[in-house]
Image: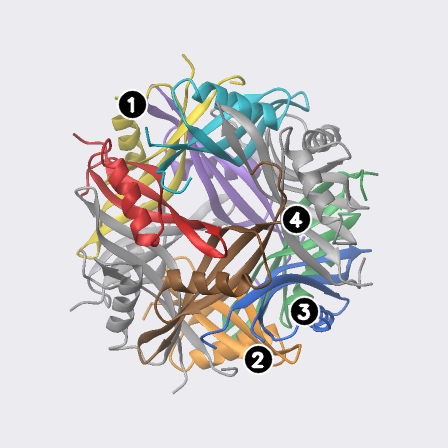
Chain colours: A blue, B green, C orange, E purple, G cyan, I yellow, J brown, L red
Amino acid sequence: MSDHVYKSIELTGSSTTGIEEAVERALEKASNTVHNMRWFEVVETRGHIEDGQVAHWQVTVKVGFTLDD
Amino acid sequence: MSDHVYKSIELTGSSTTGIEEAVERALEKASNTVHNMRWFEVVETRGHIEDGQVAHWQVTVKVGFTLDD
Amino acid sequence: MSDHVYKSIELTGSSTTGIEEAVERALEKASNTVHNMRWFEVVETRGHIEDGQVAHWQVTVKVGFTLDD
Amino acid sequence: MSDHVYKSIELTGSSTTGIEEAVERALEKASNTVHNMRWFEVVETRGHIEDGQVAHWQVTVKVGFTLDD
Amino acid sequence: MSDHVYKSIELTGSSTTGIEEAVERALEKASNTVHNMRWFEVVETRGHIEDGQVAHWQVTVKVGFTLDD
Amino acid sequence: MSDHVYKSIELTGSSTTGIEEAVERALEKASNTVHNMRWFEVVETRGHIEDGQVAHWQVTVKVGFTLDD
Amino acid sequence: MSDHVYKSIELTGSSTTGIEEAVERALEKASNTVHNMRWFEVVETRGHIEDGQVAHWQVTVKVGFTLDD
Amino acid sequence: MSDHVYKSIELTGSSTTGIEEAVERALEKASNTVHNMRWFEVVETRGHIEDGQVAHWQVTVKVGFTLDD
Amino acid sequence: MSDHVYKSIELTGSSTTGIEEAVERALEKASNTVHNMRWFEVVETRGHIEDGQVAHWQVTVKVGFTLDD
Amino acid sequence: MSDHVYKSIELTGSSTTGIEEAVERALEKASNTVHNMRWFEVVETRGHIEDGQVAHWQVTVKVGFTLDD
Amino acid sequence: MSDHVYKSIELTGSSTTGIEEAVERALEKASNTVHNMRWFEVVETRGHIEDGQVAHWQVTVKVGFTLDD
Amino acid sequence: MSDHVYKSIELTGSSTTGIEEAVERALEKASNTVHNMRWFEVVETRGHIEDGQVAHWQVTVKVGFTLDD
């Protein structure tokens, strides 16, 4: 892991179920175009409310991937 | 969504199960008196420990609602 | 609770399932040597990615315990 | 100013024109129910984008007012 | 303490004597209308200066109270 | 708005007039290559000084856009 | 710009009109005694309220200038 | 002071009187097992409220001590 | 108070007694050369420890004063 | 420098030697695909440890480049 | 790396030469009693000045190690 | 060290070589007019890039010195 160069990007995924699924949705979408994703860090957890209940969770993650080919 | 004025308040809910349920408990209680809640942001996730295990989760959310009637 | 002195330490647990289990793993391990743990606060939520999916969650908690007796 | 007790609340106003007007909209709305507002502090400046242009500004202010009489 | 929902508000009290008295003044005033206050956290300590001396201390606290009846 | 995945990027625009125009310049430039921009947040407001006056404002915004097609 | 040494100071200007003018007032006043000011960064935007309206804006900037003669 | 290695730990003391005594209580307790404590920094000032008054102050300090023997 | 320009500086005072006296010592010293000091904000509270007890408190304040006349 | 629009990205480089080399490695790699890089800011300095010694440094930088052609 | 529990501690090392050596001094000292150190993060870089020059650098690192045996 | 009053200022030095030299350049320049400098803290590490390489490092330090004569 020592001699890679990483780039990190910020993604927001959403889920009606909870935090973990919102993160996985963001990664799943990003994996179509970004390869070599290695780690993530949750930077914000928000959500929308409808009728006094959580309508969906929105979780923002910083995701790091290697620039090496 | 453009011409509303929002007020935000800070609530803490708790749950023996997990983060999501603690947030929903806080919203459920607040919805008795606060209407038009639109979004929340998790600002702190804490908990109490008993016998080396999580006794309950305590999650603090900032909740925004419209002041418009 | 008023006249205790607390010390807090920082632990990181991991789980393939989610945030709650990662915290419980950290507490379970620490409870072998640290007694009287009373509260925790989540300070960082990260994870590793393999093949575009969350391989495991890594959650860091600050844990407080009483120094008394 | 020395012996008052202040309470502060957080409001978000919006405007299609700019930051200053968004703040004034928030204060104007709040002044219907909150009296003795004395100061504000801008805590967040956001906005919505439509067709590559700012559709409206959303500015969040913390507002302090006296609890006295 | 586990199954309450808390709301927290932000108050600023002042005193010519010191930090502790400023906090107590804020709580004393708030207790006229807010019941079930349980904890506070000091979030800002400021003051006014006259003739090169502290004229009064102004201390802002976040105060949590139970929403339960 | 619930089931999108967002990516956010950071841009800095400048203007000799003020903060609002600097933000709009950044968005206008970005809209040539980035579509579906939905929101922004001001993260830094700086500027250059010449002859004791503001020569131009430099405002950095985080901009979110949908990854969905 | 590479081999200068900069000192930075913190100033607060005010205006009844808006943020930009408050910054320019601070710079104008400082330029009487500080030369070679090169950049500024807005660190706080506050204001006073009278009768439910913004009475004046108070903007604090960190200002950098070269120590070289 | 130049060639020591320091370790820092985090302690919380409490007092019914005020901030200073809460810090001294934490240090007094820790000095039973930790030697060579050199400095502290206040990182959090909280407290519990009973009947609208401060029941006790809880102050958290980071404390540095030399690892050298 | 609306049309002044303020400069703020950062000072650290110390006391064997407590936080309030450390702040007053810093202001007293500064008042020899700085006039028109108007407000302060506590930005750091530290101290030195000798023999397991607080030897002296060191409190850092940001102090604002008017640049006018 | 006044009328450019900048985009900033976040990169992490590593080195067995030290902080400066880790930054230069990140820039060198990025310069293959990103042109017109103008400035950087160090946002995190970490590293890996093997056998009680620094195995390699990992430094994260935010890098700004002009979007103009 | 996935199923370990980590504990992190905070250490400060010093050097007359520079930041890297100060970190290595801290790790070297800690490795006498702490095993399985895996990573570090620089959290503060300070130093002492004598006769207008850096007398020594003081660098604080958070160090993580596995609790597993 | 207990009964001094300190003032702290913020300086930025630069170097084509690295972080340590940039700090020393800032101190060297400041020592022409500021005496009794005692400590510094690195608050920002930036730099300029030319042709994909670090052209020079710019390091900002907060420097404390005694006001006592």
User: Which residue, given by chain and number where applicable, does mark 3 sit on?
Assistant: A23
Label 3–label 4 contact, CB within 8 A: no
Does residue E31 appear anywhere in the picture?
Answer: no
User: Which residue, given by chain and number where applicable, does mark 2 sit on?
Assistant: C15
In the rendering, at what x and y percent does residue I66 appear? 42, 20
Q: Which residue type does callout 1 highlight?
A: Ser
The residue positioned 34% from the left and 68% from the top of the image is J17
Q: Nearer the viewer, mark 4 or mark 1?
A: 4
- The image shows residue B7, relative to residue C7, as above or below, that is above
Quote the CA–CA distance across marks 1 and 2.
58 Å
Left or right: B24 as drawn, with respect to J40? right
* Chain letter for mark 1: I
Q: Give the crowd class for mark 4: few <14, some 14-19, many >=20 residues within 10 Å.
A: few
Where residue B55 is drawn, which disc sits there? none
Q: Nearer the viewer, mark 3 or mark 1?
A: 3
Q: Are marks 3 and 1 on the same chain?
A: no
The front one of J40 and C40 is J40
User: Which residue, given by chain and number where applicable, does mark 1 sit on?
Assistant: I31
Q: The N terminus of chain E lies in which quarter of the figure?
A: bottom right
In the rendering, at what x and y percent does residue J58 appear? 44, 67
